[in-house]
């Protein structure tokens, strides 16, 4: 299978001060070999969107008054991962977007290495110009295909997160059993795999089934009313992570910078049961069988299996 790739470029520039335009509203459009991007500022909000298949998908957004405040709702849901692994020291993130995740995470975990892999150098450029993110010693960015990096790099990670959307879809080679096994091999013994999924098409059930084929325990958190689901997987069977009654109390996991930005009690309430009946009909995606775009075009009918909350 041919992999999308770009020359490897590791950036570790000092400083991460917010430098988004303080002037009036604007809209910019940029076409690259990988993306068609829109940067738009309306009042204090700066959005990065990607255009594909005749529509635009929101990649990230920043509030210039408070860059640590998650504007895209699923970013809050990602912090459900703290119930499974509360103190990450090393995190690998595939997909920079507009760095909407980075501002709060690095403030909450200032001593943690957050290494990001991004395919498109223009994304990094625009994120620095308009969304206040500059790579630093603890937040390096490598310009490279995510799968290529994970295949070649032998470091171990406490959190490995996949959020590499391109105009509303994930490249198929980042959704296969073989790729997830490569991710599992890069986790520490108690490390966690995290992926942002869309639950609006039949692809969702194949996504879950494929992830479950690699990670023996998975839990999901549904961002209320948004169609995003954050799945967290581990490569061990014991201890049990799927019983929320055994999770730490949300108050014990709160960081001072979470106040007014992320409520872990609400995030815990987003924990949901796996849609096992629909997953049984899903197909495991492999390098030889990954009909991602076809499945992504089939709208899911969820009426026959309500997603009950725990």
Image (spheres, rainbow, N blue to C red):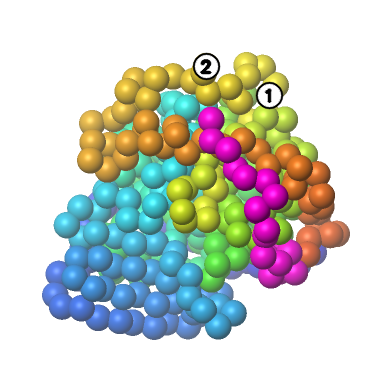
Say whether residue 4 is left or right of residue 206: left
Of discs 1 and 2, which sits in the foreground? 2
Say whether residue 27 is left or right of residue 33: left
Q: Which residue is mark 2?
A: 246
Chain part drawn in magenta: 292-310
* Image coordinates for residue 197, horizontal then vertical, percent: 58, 52
Tag 2 or tag 1, which sits nearer the N-term? 1
Instruction: Determine crowd level at label 1: few under 14, some 14-19, many 20+ residues with C-alpha closer than 10 A.
Output: some
How many numbered discs sit on the rendered protein?
2
Q: Give the residue at x 27% y 48%.
A: 68
Q: In the image shown, does 47 or 8 lie closer to the viewer? A: 47
Q: In the image shown, does 196 or 272 lie closer to the viewer? A: 272
Label 2 secondary element: helix
Q: Residue furthest right?
A: 288
Label 1 secondary element: loop
Say whether residue 226 is left or right of residue 101: right
- Which label sits on residue 259? none
Q: In terms of secondary structure, what is the magenta stretch mainly?
A: loop
Q: In the image shown, does 67 or 156 lie closer to the viewer? A: 67
Q: Which residue is mark 1?
A: 236
Say whether residue 278 is left or right of residue 78: right
Q: Give the residue at x 39% y 52%.
A: 73
Q: Give the residue at x 65% y 53%.
A: 303
* Image coordinates for residue 135, horizontal then vertical, percent: 35, 54
- 3D distance between C-alphas at marks 1 and 2: 16 Å
Answer yes or no: is residue 281 visible.
yes
* Image coordinates for residue 155, horizontal then vertical, percent: 58, 37
Question: For residue 307: magenta?
Answer: yes
Q: Give the residue at x 46% y 42%.
A: 78
Image quadrant in which the N terminus is located: bottom right
* Image coordinates for residue 144, horizontal then vertical, percent: 56, 61
Q: Compared with residue 113, is residue 178 higher up or lower down, i.e. above or below?
A: below
């Amino acid at each position: 299978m041919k992999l999308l790739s770009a020359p490897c470029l590791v950036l570790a520039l000092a400083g991460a001060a917010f430098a988004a335009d303080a002037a009036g509203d604007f809209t910019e459009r940029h076409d690259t070999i990988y993306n068609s991007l829109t940067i738009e500022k309306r009042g204090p909000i700066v959005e990065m969107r990607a255009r594909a298949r005749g529509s635009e998908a929101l990649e990230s957004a920043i509030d210039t008054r408070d860059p640590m405040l998650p504007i895209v709702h699923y970013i809050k849901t990602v912090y459900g991962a703290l119930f499974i692994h509360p103190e990450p020291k090393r995190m690998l993130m595939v997909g920079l977007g507009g760095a909407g995740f980075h501002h709060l995470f690095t403030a909450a975990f200032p001593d943690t290495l957050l290494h990001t892999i991004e395919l498109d150098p223009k994304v990094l450029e625009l994120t620095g110009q308009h969304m206040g993110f500059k790579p630093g010693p603890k937040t390096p960015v490598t310009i490279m295909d995510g799968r290529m990096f994970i295949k070649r790099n032998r470091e171990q990670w406490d959190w490995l997160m996949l959020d590499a959307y391109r105009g509303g879809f994930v490249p198929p080679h980042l959704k296969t059993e073989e790729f997830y096994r490569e991710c599992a091999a890069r986790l520490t013994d108690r490390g966690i795999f995290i992926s942002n999924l869309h639950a609006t098409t039949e692809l969702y059930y194949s996504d879950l089934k494929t992830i479950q084929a690699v990670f023996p325990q998975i839990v999901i958190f549904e961002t209320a009313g948004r169609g995003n689901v954050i799945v967290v997987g581990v490569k061990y069977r014991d201890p049990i992570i799927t019983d929320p009654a055994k999770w730490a109390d949300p108050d014990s996991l709160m960081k001072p910078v979470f106040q007014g930005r992320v409520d872990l009690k609400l995030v815990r309430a987003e924990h949901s049961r796996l849609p096992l009946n629909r997953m049984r009909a899903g197909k495991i995606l492999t390098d030889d069988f990954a009909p991602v775009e076809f499945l992504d075009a089939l709208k899911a009918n969820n009426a026959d299996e309500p997603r009950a909350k725990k």
